[in-house]
Image: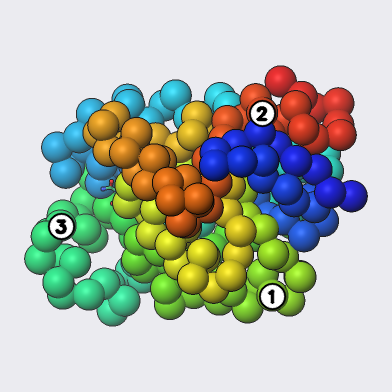
Amino acid sequence: MTVAAQALPGPFEFAPGTTALVVIDMQRDFLEPGGFGSMLGNDVSLLQAAVEPLQRVLAAARDLGMTVIHTREGHRPDMADCPPAKFARGEFIGTDSPKGRILIRGEYGHDFVDELAPAPGEIVLDKPGKGSFYATDLELMLRNRGITSLIVTGVTTEVCVHTTVREANDRGFECLVLEDCCGSYFPEFHEVALRMISAQGGIFGWVGSSADLLAALPIGARA
Ligand code: TIU
């Protein structure tokens, strides 16, 4: 079954059976006060708008039995996988916060927000960098499942979402980014980052909305 969702620069055609929904870094450390995002000086409430549409898309993906992958940015407790150059620009990585050590695996703040907790059987991918392919087994898992297309969501649009889409595009995966299921601490970066993806005939991929995706899917889980 192939479906076509309205998008820019044109319809995004995909088969749900060979498509994965990728939910990037919807972690407390980015979305809730007191975590990595707020320690960087950001207004973390700006990311909340993505949660509700993402819940609808997640429900639809589950109805269809699509592959769902949830990523988390963070590091081992001993921080052996945290590059000194990254730590130098975020020296609070690994320090204590009300939600545990910042961006450290196993800590409460590093985990997903409650509204978007993974369901049993969904893939949780821990990554040390901004891109989801760097130093992870994501590509191997996608190839093993015959996945050729990705629906990409999460935070932040211009950082981890963009890096992941660029990595995926270079590896030959077709990416649809859902604009209302992404978010940034900088609304202008969000807008421009999305435009960069679909410009030049879709230089990195496609950009659409959750409503247009859900309207294209043959399910009862539409918004
Ligand atoms: N997940 C992700 O985007 N990591 C970041 O550090 N984002 C910022 O916007 N800082």
Mark 2 residue crowding within 10 angstroms, few (<14) / some (14–19) / many (20+): some
- Residue 74: name its quadrant: bottom left
For marks 2 and 3, give the CA distance: 38 Å
Q: Nearer the viewer, residue 10 or 152?
A: 10
Could you tell me which residue is drawn at 54 percent across and 42 percent down?
Answer: 9
Q: Tell me the kind of residue under disc 3.
A: Gly
Could you tell me which residue is drawn at 73 percent across and 48 percent down?
Answer: 13
Could you tell me which residue is drawn at 49 percent across and 34 percent down?
Answer: 179
Write down the residue under mark 3: 90
Q: Quadrant of the C terminus?
A: top right
Q: Are marks 2 and 1 in contact (CB under 8 Å)?
A: no
- Residue 140: name its quadrant: bottom right
Q: Secondary structure at mark 1?
A: helix
Q: Tell me the kind of residue under disc 2.
A: Asp
Q: Secondary structure at mark 2?
A: helix
Q: Secondary structure at mark 3?
A: loop
For marks 1 and 3, give the CA distance: 34 Å
Q: Which mark is residue 212?
A: 2
Query: Is 220 placed above or below 81 here?
Result: above
Q: Which mark is residue 143?
A: 1
